[in-house]
Image (spheres, rainbow, N blue to C red):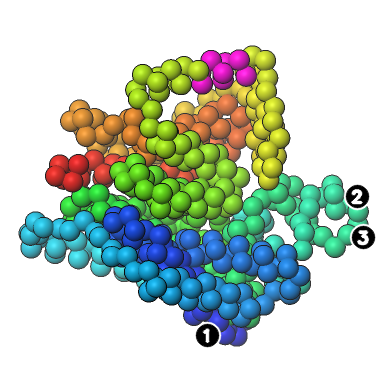
Amino acid sequence: MTDTVLLPGLFVALSLPWLCGSIWTHWLLRRTGRCNAFIVLGQGFFLGIFFTTLVIRLWDMAGFGLNFWGVAAIVSSVSVLGILLQRVRPTPTVTAPTTEPLPGWHIAVALLLVALIGWRHITLLQELLLRPLYAWDAWMNWAPKAIVWFHHGALVDFVTPQDWLQDAGQEAYTLGNREASLYPITVPLIQLWCMLGIGTWDHSVIYLPWLLAPLALGLALFGHLRLAGVPLLLAVLACYGLLSLPYLNVHTVLAGYADIWVAAAFGLAVCALYEYRQSRHWAYALLLLALALLCSQLKEPGVVLALILLLCGIRIWLDVGPRLERALWGVAGISLALALALGVSIDLPYIGRMALDSGAIELGNMGRIELAYHDVFPAFTETLFVMINWHLLWYLVLPCVAYRLTLGRVSCSSDEVLAVLGAIVFIVVIFMFSRYSMTALNFVTLNRALLYPVPAMIFCIFLSFQKRASR
């Protein structure tokens, strides 16, 4: 590992996207009258990172060689524009005030939990900088792209091994994983951005965004729960429950995977979905669309998760009555049955061919998936209740949900709950009815897939503890 790191570039690489995203998140959400600083900082981190990767792609499409300070200048200019717009047309920010005095022990316990979160992430920072282990899949699928782009100064193409062998004269690269060349490029662009900032590809600080991502997710989760009327102690407890999960911490230390970003994007999109249902304001609809787009650009399963989010958003937008909604569900069920019986196929731009018939389903770049039942229930049980990846999460979730259902505080028809249930159903179907069942039986990808709905699930569970006055 080289010790040469450009500290000014590292500071700009980490702070500038966060600043830009927070400025525009504040500009967008303050007009709704429902936002706070925690939401602005948490959502702003991910929107800023996503926007920076888009700028890198546009910069390369324009024919310029990859230049850190050139891209930084564009992001800085957009940040300044956001500040000027807020000063030219100021709109007061209205937040939900907290009127009830907090008991002293609530504050003491909340501060203790925050201190534990801080200490945990200090130790994670130490592990990340020492980098004793390398994330295998990250170095097989994503990191090589960023390294090649860094050395070339351009986003050269990656193709399948077959295409590479057929045209050896082309300026393109390939990877050992046959499908990796088709993966979305947002994650390697995050790595590339830090590489360009510090001036080298070989240093652990490149992966500091993987440490900041869960912290920003925790900020946004706390902000959304407080805005929804959840008491302070319970909101902090939700953040502690999420950020102390062993498997989430694993993906922070073994940085480079896309899964922590998919989980954060989907979770924050569900938070935006809830706020859109509450306010019906276009600003939260736009935030939902941006996060759904980010979700689709991180990993192939993110495309399906994004479609689930969009369907729930459309359901809110249409605002149909219960009778019409039941009729629509009936039509959807009949249409699905006919598609399975007769077969249906459609080509979508940027996604690929989507097809469905009685024996298989085709999902764009994910390819054709043959459908057949596989008994992976024991693998699910061992993963959730025996292994230590999730600590006590699932032991607490099931009785908590059952208890809240008996009190009528959790509605399965709520759009945010439907989004979480849709993600869980998608994961179960993929592992029970496709070739991916093998990766569940050997526990290779099952935990990673289960990570996707966890932040959103925790949000929905603690949302049921909101004060009745806020409901």
Above-or-below relation of 283 to 5: above
- Most frequent secondary structure within the magenta stretch: helix
Tag 3's secondary structure? loop
Asked whether 337 falls inside the magenta stretch, the response is yes
Residue 246, label in figure: none
Q: CA distance from mark 1 to mark 2?
A: 44 Å
Q: Which mark is residue 169?
A: 3
Query: Which residue in the structure is indicated by mark 2?
Result: 166
Q: Is residue 361 left or right of residue 118?
A: right
Q: Looking at the figure, which quarter contains the N terminus?
A: bottom right
| Residue that carries the numbered disc 1 in the rendered image | 8
Q: Earlier in the sequence, mark 3 or mark 1?
A: 1
Residue 16's place in the image compared with 134, above or below, is below
The correct choice, above or below, for 96 with respect to 82 in the image is above
Give the camera-side residue of 280 and 337: 280
Region of the chain picked out in magenta, as a range: 332-339
